[in-house]
Amino acid sequence: MWLVSGYEDARTVLGDAEAFSNVDASSSHLMGDKDNLGSPPPPGVMLRHDGDSHARLRLRLAREFMVKRVAKLEPFIRDVVKSHIDRMASQKGPVDLYREFALPVTALIIGEILGVPEEQRPEFEKATAAQVDLSLSLEERQAAALQSAGFFVALVQAKLQSPGDDLLSRLILQPTERPMDAAELQGLALLLLAAGHDTTANMITLGTYALLQNPEQMAKLQDLTVMETGVDELIRYLTIVHNGVLRKALVDTEIAGQRILAGEHVAVVLESANRDPRFLSDADKLDLDRHSAHLGFGYGPHQCLGQHLARLELRVALPELFRRFKGLKVATPESEISFKNDMVVYGIKKLMIDWEEVIS
Amino acid sequence: MTFDIKIDKCVGAGVCAIAAPGIFDQNDDDGIVVVLDANPSNDQLGQLRDAAARCPAAVITLMEP
């Protein structure tokens, strides 16, 4: 197993899908689960498909996550953010920002895109939150993951029988040479949930924390346009996809002078690439005015499909949190904040926040 | 400055459409790149360079004069 940590080398590996396969692009290397390496990619999970098989899925979905299409979700996102801020405000602080805000907000948004019916939202929210809740035991989390998989089996069946106006229904209804079957739709729905829920939730929590730690950057939020590009700097600075994305060499090749043989695995460490001093000066500093070609969403043909959605959610949620909660602060001593250093998706396990006053 | 695009490599990430919205857009059918302005003016040069650097599939090649 090789680790690639430099910015240019990371781009070389991730950008060359002919030399580096995604077939093992799971987190098995982190779990010591070597048996899972080399298993065939599940249907619909395009993250682990290469070439035409990947392109077929990706290009059917790209339209759903286009900049202009995602922009239409802004009113829904604003409503969800507002109602959850209202709900926190009605409680007396401190509250856990991750559990009370970040997780439900991001679950409801991906649920809306996938077409989860309104009456099933509480069940959906509960199952998705339990899956990533580290205060639960591994067995409890696995049970929640099964429940969530079962939820999608039922959802896909419902959409096949009576399609509506949502992503899954459009995939079912669009004329195409090779329609997606139920297994592919279920795999895809689970992938979109995994990729779009806890990632953005962790970005909201960590982003709030990072801004509170950097008051001179937080002050910049007064200018409502700063997050248009500032959101990318937060994504670079925090780079939540941690501990390496895995590729498998298909041919003998060389990276940074190191010979890599066909069949060997390469883990590309995005968080170190994004702070490579050869890429960016003062890379350890958060600067919302900075503009960069960062790798926070990855690079190459598998680059994050939902990146514009993530940007929009963060652009709405973060300034609104700071606007509504005057005197927002972390309510836990610094030494008690627990970071997800050992997880594939980096974050804060629990972030208790408090405030002085709620602005309407 | 002019540029060339290798449309076969496009994966519809839409990074060009946010980096240089006056030059690039996405096709409604599949999200693939659409060129709005093949001869961008000098004041759009920064945006064009940004789009080329950030495109995840290296679709955009700048033709330096």
Image: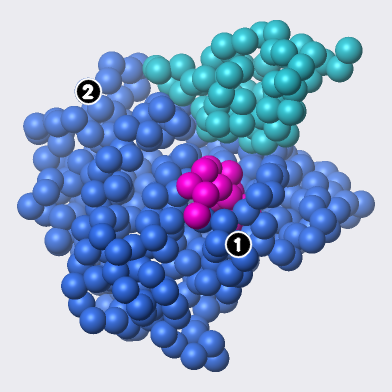
Q: Is residue A360 above or below residue B60?
A: below
Q: Is residue A107 visible?
A: no
The quarter of the picture where the C terminus of chain A appears is: bottom left
Residue A264 lies, in percent from the top left, at 72, 55
Q: Are marks 1 and 2 in one subunit? A: yes
Residue A256 lies, in percent from the top left, at 88, 52
Chain B shade in the render: cyan
> Residue placed at 76% from the left, 42% from the top?
A12
Which residue is at the front of the view, B15 or A229? A229
Mark with earlier residue (1, 2): 2
Could you tell me which chain the residue with mark 1 belongs to? A
Name the kind of residue labelled 2 in the image. Answer: Leu
Start-end of magenta stretch: A222-236
Q: Is residue A203 above or below residue A109?
A: below
Which residue is at the front of the view, A286 or A63? A286
> Residue placed at 82% from the left, 56% from the top?
A281
Which image quarter: residue A65?
top left
Could you tell me which chain the residue with mark 2 belongs to? A
Q: State the mark number for residue A173.
A: 2
The quarter of the picture where the N terminus of chain A appears is: bottom right
The chain letter of the blue chain reads A
Instruction: Give the CA distance from mark 1 to mark 2.
Output: 46 Å
Which image quarter: residue A107?
bottom left
Which image quarter: residue A319?
bottom left
Q: Magenta stretch containing residue A319, yes or no?
A: no
Name the kind of residue labelled 1 in the image. Answer: Gln
Q: Could you tell whether A313 is left or right of B50 in the image?
A: left
Residue A69 lies, in percent from the top left, at 37, 29
Q: State which mark lies toward you, 1 or 2.
A: 1
- Residue corresponding to mark 1: A217
Q: Could you tell whether B39 is left or right of B33 in the image?
A: right
